Image: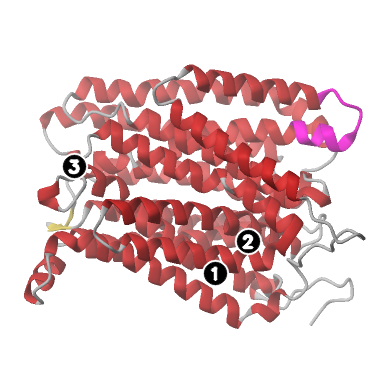
Amino acid sequence: MLPTDGRDTGGLGGHPRGLTTLFFTEMWERFSYYGMRALLILFMVKTAAEGGLGYDTKRAAAIYGTYTMSVYLLSILGGFIADNFIGARRAVLVGGIVIASGHYAMAFSSTATFFAGLVLIALGTGLLKPSISTMVGSLYRPDDERRDAGFSIFYMGINLGAFLAPLVTGYLAQSAGWKARLAQWGLDPLHCWHWGFAAAGVGMTCGLVLYVLQRDRLAQVGHAPTPAPDGSRPWGKLALVALGSLALILAMKASDDHPQLVYLLFGLQVAALLGFAFQPDPDRRRIAAILVFFMAAEVFWAIFEQTGSSLTLFADRLTRNEILGLPFPSSWWQSVNSVWVILLAPAFAFLWIRLGHRQPSSPLKFVLGLLFVALSFVLMVPAAQLTAAGRVSPLWLVGLFFLQTVGEMLLSPVGLSTMTKLAPQRLVGLVMGIWFLAAALGNKLAGVIAGEFTSDHADQLAAFFWHQALGVAACTLVLFALVPWMKRLMGGVR
């Protein structure tokens, strides 16, 4: 039932009904992604005798960074395809099918199917991820005060899937009990990793079934675009976007050996920011604001996304992985961040609604997000020093994930909502793709940094965390100084 102002309030908590459908679809998609990611670097660094690929930390972290970067970078291409060819609703369906195919490919025990699966998951996620976020934004009017709360609820769905996934896939890949069960069945227990990868594919399949069954709730959003009067489509632009995406992936992969490419990319971002900032057109000035958010998000994700690389290795090699004396798989640590999100997301959603127009501006929320992620690595400095005496208490990682989650709740769902408000209507999908490009580059940088992780020298490990904390703290101060200017660029958008 719609109120007199035409808003859909028939869903959970007075939100649009389609939010529930997108909540559960994204939950299962994130189950598949985080379920596989929880195993990825561990599978690569384990020896062949342990069922892994036997790569060293630097090589495994580089592959991990390139993969996670590609997942998000291809969102630009996926957003363009949705905006100009098939629409967001169909993009989510096709993307989910490709993702599931990738996970099932990784269920086979061969290097070729492993890398083929990574490619398919990256392609499918690039198509699905910006489109499902765009549809969440389309459920609300631009001036609807429920928007940030809606994105916070949607974000809780992401993390519900991310919480459950490592528990399931980690058990299948690492637990002694499951390995013994496979042996009883006459199956090779060294293939346990691939059972975990297959479980991730089952999760994506569940999401697809739910999405199709509840498609009527999304009948008003995500339509395919109307073709031009002559029936033409922008195939030339599609080719340019595809080639540009491929070139950027190859360039960032090359930065593993040529780090000067990273500085060149940063310089190009600054030049683009200044070029848009001093234009009289309000839409162009808002693009400049988007670029500031973009650069702040890059820094944030470069620290935060080490959850699946350096922090996973810290948990596996240097942490006592037990509760009340009972051991658990090290991959289960990747569920802790999601526990904090599930606990904190309702509180943040309530807080933003309660504060209304009195809540902090989006730029200030970003400042606070960076501050908390910097503090999380400050906390790890004494934890790293204590590793000289052996494995450390699990409470260090619990505290780190709490601080990072507070920062995440201040930055990530707010960033999603802000992008949909700042983007010109004709470019919403593309701008969402650009937002995920920030995550892409941050993920790649996270992989590069994680390649320097060492578990053999406590002092070097402490410096590893300390230097990153100081770098993020400096970026936080710069962004805080830019808050008044950003408010002017945003032209009244909060």
* SS for dot 2: helix
Q: CA distance from mark 3 to mark 2?
A: 37 Å
Whether the magenta-drawn stretch holds residue 64 is answered as no
- The stretch in magenta equals 277-288
Q: Which kind of residue does numbered mark 1 sit on?
A: Thr
Mark nearest the camera among 1 and 3 is 3
Q: Is residue 7 above or below residue 33?
A: below
| Disc 3 residue type (three-letter) | Gly
The correct choice, above or below, for 422 with respect to 2 in the image is above
Q: At numbered mark 1, what does the secondary structure look like: helix, strand or loop?
A: helix
Tell me which residue sits at (17%, 46%) in the image. 320
Q: Amino acid at mark 2?
A: Ile
Q: For label 2, count other residues whose C-alpha is less than 10 Å away and answer few (under 14), some (14-19) or many (20+).
A: many
- Pick the quarter of the image with the N terminus: bottom right
Q: Which mark is residue 132?
A: 2
Magenta run includes residue 280: yes
Where in the figure is residue 39, as x and y percent of width and height? 29, 53
Residue under circle 3? 54
Task: Residue 418: tell me if it is visible.
Answer: no
Residue depicted at x 91% and y 28%: 280
- Residue 410 disc label: none
The residue pinned by badge 1 equals 25
Residue 464, horizontal then vertical, whole percent: 32, 24
Q: Secondary structure at mark 3?
A: loop
